[in-house]
Amino acid sequence: NCPDDSNSDQANLDNDSLGDVCDPDADGDGYISDASNFGGNDCADDNPLIYPGQIEDPFNGVDDNCVNGTDEPLSVADFYDVIGNNQLVVPAPGVLANDLSQNTITSAILHSPAVHPELIWNGDGGFTFNPPVGFTGTYTFSYNATDQYDTISSTAGIVTLTQTELFCGLPISAYTSIIDGTPGNDNLQGTNGDDLIRGFAGDDKINGKKGNDCIYGGSGDDKINGGSGNDTIFGEEGNDKINGNNGDDYISGGDGNDKINGNNGIDTLYGDAGKDTIHGGNDNDYINGGTELDKCYGGNGNNVIDECEILKKFDDDNEGEDSDNNQSNSNHDDKGKSDDKKDDKGKSDDKKDDKGKKK
């Protein structure tokens, strides 16, 4: 029988009212001893640093967390970036590379989620992640490391995958300047570097200036000038006027009746939805009018034109329509003119003198 008060002849590790022999938590760590007379789960009630749930030290030769009776591997958290919605492939040793053990870590056991169609788990620490449709934010899963003696880490390692949003195919860190508009009508000026410019809502005026810029007009009737450099421009919703200017530009008009001019450079131009007017300008361009009734003018160069209902080389009726002229369009019927030459009155070329007599 244990007395209610401590006995002076007993050790009292935690200096409470009970001697250690009669104390179910002699070390005062909050866990009951696993001794048969107490029935707890603290495997070392004489050491306050050893208790269930303690983080395992894989190198001290002690079962710190009262699980395996020996040292076990320690699974350490891992973090990976997912670029846009692209597949992420992590080769072995993968998540095991930073785990700790005095023994050799040989494999990893997937802990959660139980159902993971987007995750291909290899067992050697490597894995493949296929982002589900619409994936944004983060995705997490956990695993347990195992050593060559089949000792399993009791604490699961948490793996966090974070999507890195792409702008024109690049992460935001790739741009020299980030220039954002407001919901109102903005006048946004780029720099001489590679800018990310986002107009958002409103009828905005945007000038990319120099550099390889990424420009989003946002909703509203925007006026966008890419400036010099190989720019990527999205007009988005609204009736936009977009000028690529110099450089090999990629331009997407988005929804609305847009006016697009590639100008100089080898440009790729899409009208998208709406009744668009597209000018290729100089050099060899690709033009796609998109849906509805679009007018496309190839301009100079060997151009390829698709999905355009009205197709000409130049926006000038005196130049005539381009029947072949290095342009292709499956929707275009050539309209050639006769080569017969007549004078202003439709007469033959027979020459007469001033009195109407033949010479």
Image: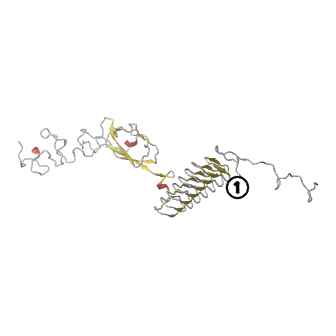
Question: Residue 226 appears in which quarter of the rendering?
Answer: bottom right
Look at 24% across and 40% down and name the residue there.
67
Between 285 and 4, the residue placed more toward the observer is 285
Corner quadrant of residue 155? top left
Q: Residue lying farthest top?
A: 149
Decide if residue 320 is in sight here. Answer: yes
- Drawn side of residue 256 relative to residue 281, left or right: left
Quadrant of the frame with the C terminus: bottom right
What sort of colour scheme is used for the picture? secondary structure
At x 81% / y 49%, what residue is drawn? 340
**Which secondary structure, mark 1?**
helix
Q: Quadrant of the N terminus?
A: top left
Whether residue 106 is visible to the viewer of this picture, yes or no, is: no
In the image, 64: left or right of 296?
left
Kind of residue indicated by mark 1: Asp
Residue 116 locus on image (x, y percent): 38, 39
Q: Position of residue 23 (x, y in %)?
A: 11, 45
Give the residue at mark 1: 317
Q: Left or right: where does residue 123 sit relative to residue 26?
A: right
Is the residue marked by circle 1 packed among few (<14), some (14-19), or many (20+) residues within 10 Å? few
Is 178 in front, or is 52? 178
Q: Where residue 323 sits: x, y (%)?
A: 70, 47
Q: Which of 196/194 is in front?
A: 196
Q: Position of residue 298 (x, y in %)?
A: 65, 52
Query: Tag count in the figure?
Result: 1
Q: Quadrant of residue 279?
A: bottom right
Q: Nearer the viewer, residue 91 or 258?
A: 258
Relative to 340, does residue 210 appear above or below in the rendering? below
